[in-house]
Amino acid sequence: MKDGINLLRQAWCFGLLLISLGTAHAQAEFSYQAVLDLSYGRFEPSGFYREHRFNSNSLSASFVGGTAKYGFDDGWASGITLETFLRFQDMKTGRRDSDPFFSRNAFAFVNSKYGNVRVGRLQTFLFDTTTRFNALGNSVAFSPALRQVFVAGNLIGAQGDFYWDQAISYSSPNFDGLTGNLMYAKGDSAERGDYGAASAVWAYGLFAATASVQSVHIDDGIKDPTDEKLWQLGATYNFGFARVFGLYNQTRDKGLDVNSKSSSIGASAVLGPGSLLVQMGLSKATGLAVDRKQTTVSAAYVYPYDSQTDIYIIGMDDRVRDQTRGFSMAVGIRLKL
């Protein structure tokens, strides 16, 4: 964590120095961003006991943060973004106790006509494309796409978390709807390794598609090493009356000697005063001692009370072969600031 903070400070100072050279005029800006999501319901993933409790990420993850930016006349800008997750059920920050205080994002950036560079703690591009190409967005608690790629465990899901420490990324300018992204990270002190990722997103009218790859190698000399490669394809199309989503992921984990495949389809449509969101995910993992199959179906109805406030009800049916069936449901409110 200390190394990550030092790297963040160095990158911030370097960015300011780089942009200030030869530039006479600048403008400072500050903005804040927040999503507050509070729900109450029954939470029961397959194979677990049910809980009745409050939750902070049923439709979207709750977080608060801010961005300080220094803009210049020639289109360059430098700044820093700091964000932390909130858990109302525990009255704590972070997704879990082991998260750093700035658990969502903590990075310095330099933006220009040549692209964007960020350094620090970053959300992975794989998580970004998975949220963009499924009907339930970044609902970690209920989205089948997110749950099977990031929450279902190492046998099916991606290893290495979906936030990387000591990371650097580059995002290209938009070339007629096409953008490219690269990321490399060393990870935190507990899981030091080599993390690499690349993605491309193409948007053309009502259609959008993505291709993403990710490689994670962790070896601390004590635990079994991680050596995993994952690739993803996704697409979405807006028919007007409904928008459809599709995702496909394939993972090869040499450390666990497991291959996994997962697919997800979904749709969102206006229904009455609100919107109906539906998503289904199928996944399978196979190996020398592994034969796991999971099916997850989720649906939500979201009513926009006003421009910032959504009221919703959401449910999930989760089934893993040879485990007890799980059924979750919650009613909540989401405030976007």
Image: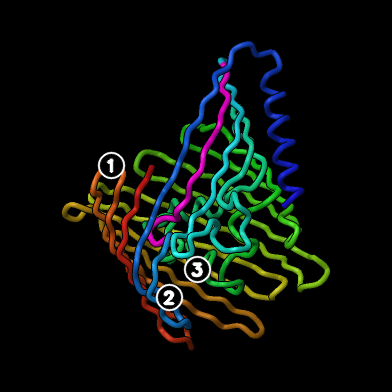
Element type where label 1 sits in the image: loop
**Rendered residue at 64%/75% (across/down):** 258
Q: Earlier in the sequence, mark 2 or mark 3?
A: 3
Residue ID for mark 2: 295
* Coordinates of residue 83 in the picture (x, y in percent): 54, 46
Image quarter where the C terminus lies is top left
Q: Is 201 located above or below residue 285 in the figure?
A: above
Q: Residue furthest top?
A: 24
The one nearer the camera, 261 or 58, is 58
Q: Earlier in the sequence, mark 3 or mark 1?
A: 3
Principal secondary structure, stretch drawn in magenta: strand
The one nearer the camera, 312 or 113, is 312
Q: Which residues are magenta?
A: 57-72
Please give the label number shown on residue 148: 3
* Coordinates of residue 133 in the picture (x, y in percent): 43, 53
- Kind of residue at badge 3: Gln
Q: Is 300 located above or below residue 152 in the figure?
A: above
The one nearer the camera, 289 or 39, is 39
